[in-house]
Each structure stands twice: as C-alpha cells, then as structure tokens.
Image (cartoon, rainbow, N blue to C red):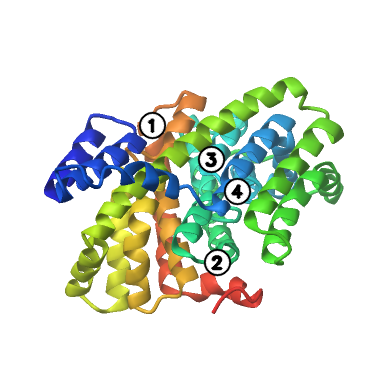
C-alpha cells in the first residue's frame, strides 16, 4: 500500500498526466498483491469495464453541444439577455456575467467551457468598461462553477453512474445550490460596486423594451435548457437522450436558424470534443484499475473506519469529508478525485444517515469549488490562457468569492432541504 502511494504522488509531482498516473499506480497495486503478475490480465478488462456504462455517453454529447453553442453565437445571445436584466446596476457587467453563467449552466455542464467562453468575451468587455483584468477574470472564474452545479453536470453523470444514484435526482438537487452560488456572488459584487465604485451603465432603471427585445433575440437559446431539463426532470428522456437532443437542437440553431455554423466548422468542433472526451474517459478507465485494487485491499472501509474513529457525530464527519475534498482539490484533477473517492465517501455518508442525492450534491459541489482554487484549478489555467493575466493576480482577486462559495457549500451540507426540496417536489427524492 505504501509503495502504491509513493508511486502515485511521485508521478504527480513530476507532472505526469493524471490518467497515466492512475493506471500505473493501479498496475503497481496489482503487482503488490501478487508479484508473479497473476492479476495483470485484469488490467484491460477493468479498463473497459470502467467505461462500460451507457450514461457516460451523455458527456461527449453535452461537450459537443457546448462547442456548437459557443461557435454559433448562442452564448452571445444569452449574455445579451442577462445584460438587459441586470446590466443597469453598478458593476452591471459583473452581475450580467453571473446571470449568464446561470443561463449557460443549463446548456453544457462544464466549468471550463464557461470559463473559456466568457473569458474570451466578457473579460475584454469588462476591462474596456473600466474593470481591472484580475477582477474581471475572478468574476468569470467564480461564475464558471455554476455550470457543473446547475444541471446538466458531467460530474453528476459520473457520480450517479458509478454509485447507482438517480442522475435526474442529482440534476434536480443541484438547482438551488447553483442559484445560491450566483446569489452570493452577486451580493459580493454589489458590495464591491459601492466600495470600489465599479462602472455603471447609463440610465438608472431597466428598460422593459430592451428586456423584451433581448428575450426575443435569445428565445431560441433560452429554450434549450428548458428542453434539456424538462425532458430529464419530467421523466421524458434519459440524460443521454437529452444530451443527444441538445446536440441536434444546437446544430439546428447554429446551421439553420442563425446560420453562424457551417459544415467546415464541424470538423474542428468534433476534434475538440474528441480530445476533451478522450482525456476524461482515460481518467475514468485508469481510475477503475486503481479502484479495483483499493476495493481488494478494503481501503474504503479502512478510511471510513478512520473517520468514524475520530467521531461518529454526523456534523463532524461531514466537516472532515469537506475538509479533505477541498484540500485534495487544490492539487488533484477533480474527475480523478471523484472516481477514486466516491466509492469511499458514499458508503460513509450512508452510515451517518445522509440521503444519497444530498451526499452526491455535497461531494460534487466541493469538487466544483476546487476548479478555481490554486495551484491546479482548471478554470484558473483556462482564464490565464485566454486573458493573458497571471494566475497569481486572478487568485488574489478571487479569494472573497471562494470564501463565499465555501460558505454555501457548508450550508448545503448541513441543511438538506437546500438540496432535496426540488427532487422531492418532482418525486425524485426519498
């Protein structure tokens, strides 16, 4: 066990991609069980079995739908509608970013997609209006994790598929936490607006005419999340079917209605989708090998026993789980963390009496926050790349948002109604 841990962390330190790290550590674990190599033939079997879940097909569909929407101009229409709603406030463009993040969340389910889309469009626009570049990038980073919190969410698809939890229930459970994140970030922006005299658009009231025109212009785009979530939460479609419908609808909007996407664009979008999907699926498949070794050695049970030896009080155990997730999230890829830790933490949460949907949302939200915490937060790297700003400066501007979102995380963890009210209302909870 010690050898596997040393190999795992040594490979991480030297910068090896996490997909290879997981696979090599898993094979090393099998070797420690039987140095003769008796378990090695199981490697390709586990590699395949880790991906042999129909619901995983939803991920490439949602990723491709996001690519089409970014290319087709649907993103710009959502931003225009958001700006018509709240752009008149002091710090209006920052407020618009949060509202647009909520709207965009119902389309892609990926934080990095949101960060890339808004980093290319809203950050330069905010800088032009007088916002500092680090603050503008921090606002986009803070809003980007709303994407994988409000459904659809790729992390929820992975968690639900691995742990046998209702994906529709997880999707419904993420709605209120996602809105709370947007609300607390907008409250911070309002505070900063008065303190730092953030730019304010001309006029003191929202224009009803402008809102109606923006709604008309973005109506087709706004209907997409309604179709996706309505189909899944209404029991009409599975998440995979809804993802396929999202692709078809996005292509219809981009190629027929808006005419901003041509046949020549499809190749680039498919290549990018394949690359992103390949990275995620390599992590999932490799983690399946390491996961088998952990199960064989009863490591999940051992970790649960350690937690419960500290305290059997559910509140204390939840605090320990969140502290571990936030700490590890600063250094590890969240997909790998979810696949490795879900089989460990899910039984532990059941032991202390947590609802499976509630526990899943708590774990996913903690991992989402890790996307914007240094030193390896994926959204930070995306924004640094597309804006040209240093990660250190973005991180300094981002810390108030991180603190606020961690506060929402603990509220969600200790107040089950925030997560379970919508699933129960839709008949998806216990």
Which comes before the other along the chain, label 4 or label 2? 4
Gap between marks 4 and 3 measured at Cα: 25 Å
Which comes before the other along the chain, label 3 or label 2? 3
Gap between marks 3 and 1 measured at Cα: 13 Å
The extreme top residue here reads: 264
Numbered disc in front, either 3 or 2? 2
Depth check: give the residue in front, 70 or 209: 70
Which comes before the other along the chain, label 1 or label 2? 2
- The residue indicated by pointer 1 is 391
Picture quadrant where residue 325 is located: bottom left
Which comes before the other along the chain, label 3 or label 1? 3
Q: Is residue 162 above or below residue 197?
A: below
Numbered disc in front, either 1 or 4? 4
Numbered disc in front, either 4 or 3? 4
Q: Is residue 402 toward the left or the right of residue 192 in the image? A: left
The residue sitting at 55% across, 44% down in the picture is: 110
Gap between marks 1 and 4 measured at Cα: 32 Å
Residue 58: mark: 4
- The residue indicated by pointer 2 is 166
The residue sitting at 76% across, 23% down in the picture is: 263
Which comes before the other along the chain, label 4 or label 3? 4
* Pointers 1 and 2 in contact (C-beta within 8 Å): no
Q: Is residue 89 above or below residue 13?
A: below
Number of residues whose C-alpha sits closer than 10 Å to that of mark 4, classed few (under 14), some (14–19) or many (20 or more): many
Residue 140: mark: 3
């Amino acid at each position: 066990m010690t050898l596997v841990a040393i190999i795992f962390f040594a490979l991480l330190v030297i910068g090896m991609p996490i997909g290879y790290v997981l696979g090599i550590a898993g094979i090393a674990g099998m070797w420690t069980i039987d140095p003769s190599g008796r378990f090695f033939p199981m490697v390709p079997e586990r590699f395949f079995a880790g991906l042999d879940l129909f619901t995983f097909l939803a991920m490439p569909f949602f990723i491709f739908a996001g690519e089409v929407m970014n290319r087709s101009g649907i993103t710009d229409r959502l931003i225009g509608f958001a700006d018509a709603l709240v752009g008149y406030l002091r710090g209006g463009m920052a407020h618009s970013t949060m509202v647009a993040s909520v709207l965009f969340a119902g389309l892609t389910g990926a934080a990095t997609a949101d960060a890339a889309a808004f980093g290319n469009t809203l950050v330069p626009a905010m800088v032009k209006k007088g916002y500092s570049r680090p603050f503008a990038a921090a606002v986009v980073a803070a809003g980007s994790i709303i994407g994988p919190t409000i459904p659809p969410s790729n992390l929820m698809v992975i968690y639900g598929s691995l742990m046998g939890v209702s994906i529709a229930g997880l999707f419904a459970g993420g709605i209120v936490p996602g809105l709370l994140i947007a609300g607390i970030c907008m409250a911070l922006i309002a505070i900063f607006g008065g303190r730092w005299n953030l730019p304010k658009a001309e006029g003191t009231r929202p224009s009803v005419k402008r809102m109606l025109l923006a709604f008309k212009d973005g109506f087709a785009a706004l209907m997409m999340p309604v179709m996706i979530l309505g189909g899944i939460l209404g029991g009409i479609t599975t998440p995979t079917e809804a993802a396929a419908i999202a692709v078809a609808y996005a292509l219809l909007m981009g190629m027929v209605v808006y005419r901003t996407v041509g046949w020549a664009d499809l190749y680039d979008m498919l290549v990018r989708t394949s690359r992103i999907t390949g990275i995620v699926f390599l992590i999932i498949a490799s983690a399946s090998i390491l996961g088998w070794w952990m199960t064989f050695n009863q490591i999940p049970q051992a970790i649960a026993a350690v937690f419960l030896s500290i305290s059997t009080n559910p509140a204390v155990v939840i605090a320990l789980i969140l502290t571990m997730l936030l700490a590890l999230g600063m250094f590890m890829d969240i997909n790998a963390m979810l696949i490795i830790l879900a089989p460990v933490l899910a039984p532990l949460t059941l032991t202390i009496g947590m609802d499976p949907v509630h526990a899943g949302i708590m774990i996913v939200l903690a991992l989402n926050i890790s996307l914007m915490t240094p030193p390896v937060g994926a959204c930070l790297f995306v924004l640094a790349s597309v804006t040209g700003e240093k990660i250190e400066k973005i991180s300094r501007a981002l810390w108030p948002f991180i603190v606020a979102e961690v506060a929402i995380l603990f509220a969600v963890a200790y107040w089950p109604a925030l997560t379970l009210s919508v699933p129960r209302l839709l008949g998806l909870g216990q």
